[in-house]
Amino acid sequence: MELTILKLMSSRDNYERYSRFLKPEVLTDKGAQVFKDIGEWFDSNPSAEEINYDEFSSWFCAVQHPMFKHEKQEVYRQIFENLKDHEVSEEAQSTIIQSFIQKDYLAQIAELCYAGVEGSKQVSLEQVEDLIEKGYQDTGKIDELESFAVQDSLEEIVQERLEGMSYEFRLEELNVSVGHPKGLIVLGMRPDAGKTTMLASEVTYMAPQLPEERPVIWLNNEEKGSDVKYRIVQAALGKTDDEIDSNPLGCIQEYNQKIGKDKIVVCDNVFHLRDAQALIKKYNPGLVVIDQLWNMGGLERLSENEASRQGLLFREARKLAKEYGPVLVAHQLGRDAEQVKYPDMNSFYLSGTAIQAHADLIITVGMIRDPNYMYSRFLGIVKSKLGKGPRVQKELRHGQFEIEIQPEIARFKGTY
C-alpha cells in the first residue's frame, strides 16, 4: 500500500491534489522521507510533470542525502527501483488516498478518546464529534480540484437547462417575478405566519412535476413530523380537516394517485448536517426542503463563530442544489420583522449575511397581526438570480405582492 501511495505522488498533478491530505505519521520512516523529498524535488524542478526515478535516485543520494551511509542509500535505491515498475489504476487512486486520510483521523479519534478515558485531559463528546466532522469534510474534498472543471457537453448543459426550467410554482406571483425554481431558495417568515403551509402549498404543486424516479425529501427539525405530513396531504388535496376526517381512506387513495405514496419523503428530527447529507444521498431527490437549516449542528470545528458556521451551512446547501436540484430552505425572521409587511434582508435571524452570499432566491413573507389582515400575507422578492420562464415580467424581479393564506386547506393563493 505504501509503495502505491508513493507511486501516486510521482505525478505532479496527483501530488498537488492529494499531498495535503497525507500525514507523514501514517507512513513508515523511509516512506515519509521519500514523500517529503518528492515535494522538494517538484519544487526544485518546476517544469517536471512526472518523476524519472533514475534521475530522482541520483539526486536523492548525491544532493539531498550525501551523508547517508552507503548501506542506507542502497535501501532507498531499491525503493526507487520498485517504484519504477509499480503501476496503479486510475480508479484506485482516490480510494487509496481516502483510506490513508481515514486511518489518520481514526488514529486521532482513538488518541483523543483514550486521553479522555485515562483522564489525562478533559475530553467532551462534542470534541470527538468535531473531529469526526473534520474527517468527513476532508474525505469529501478528495476530488474537489478535479470537480472545478466543467465536464458537461454543450448538449448536456442545454438539456439540463430545459429540464430545470420545466418546474413552476403554485403561486403565479412567483412565476411572473422569478420564473422557474432553481438553486438555493430561502423562505423567511415569522413564527406562526404560515411557514409550513407555504412550504406544503408549493411543494405539493412541484412534486408531480419532478421525474418519476426523483422524490422530494423534506428534512424537518421544527415541528412534529406527523403534523407536517398531514399538512402535505391537506395541501395536495385542497381539503379541510372535516373533509379528510369524513373519508380518510378515500383521501389517502386520492393523495397516492395525485402525488404518489412515496413521492414526498418527510424525515423527522434531522438536527445535524451529516444526517441531512446522508439522507439526501440515500433518496437522490429532485427537490430538497430543509426546515430549518440554521437549527442544524455541524461544521463547528471549522468555524470561528456562529456567523461563520451559518455561512458554511448555507454554502453546503448551495452545493446540494448544484448536485440534486432546487433546495428550499425555511428560515425564521427576527423580531424586527414583526408587524412589517415586507421584511428586508436584515430581518433574517442569525444568518442574513450568509444567506445573501449563497442564496439564488430569497423570499420574505410578512404579516400584520390585526383582525383586518387575519389572512393577508405580504410576499417580497428580496434577492433573485433567477428570472427564466415563459411568463416572467422583468419589472417584477423584486416585486411585492399581497397574497392570502388558506389555513383550512394548507395553501396560499394569489391574485394573479
Image (cartoon, rainbow, N blue to C red):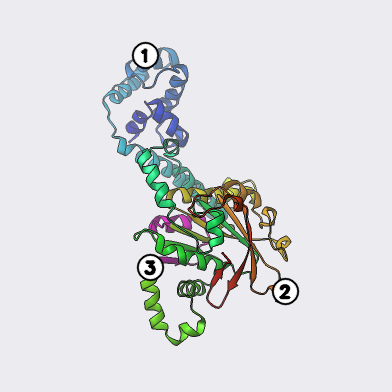
Distance CA(mark 3)–CA(mark 2): 39 Å
Q: Does residue 331 belong to the magenta stretch?
A: no
- The percent position of residue 166, horizontal first and vertical second, equals 42, 55
Name the element at disc 1: helix
The answer to which of 213 and 220 lies nearer the viewer is 213
Q: Is there any visible trace of residue 292 in the rendered image?
A: no
Query: Label 1 vs label 2: CA separation?
Result: 85 Å
Instruction: Quadrant for the C terminus, please.
Output: bottom right
* Kind of residue at disc 3: Asp
Give the SS element for disc 3: loop
Mark 2 Cα-neighbour bin, 10 Å: few <14, some 14–19, many ≥20: few
Tag 2 or tag 1, which sits nearer the N-term? 1
Mark carried by residue 262: 3
- Residue 267 is situated, as x and y percent measured from the top left of the image, at 46, 65
Q: What is the x, y in percent for residue 205?
A: 46, 65
Q: Which residue is mark 1?
A: 58
Taking depth in this image into account, of 263 and 313 the one nearest to the observer is 263
Q: What is the span of residues highlighted in magenta in the rendered image?
A: 262-286
Name the residue beneath numbered marker 2. 370
Callout 2: SS: loop
Q: Are marks 3 and 2 in contact (CB under 8 Å)?
A: no
Left or right of 155 on screen, residue 125: right
**Where is 291 relative to 27, above or below?**
below
Residue type for callout 1: Ser
Q: Quadrant of residue 266?
A: bottom left
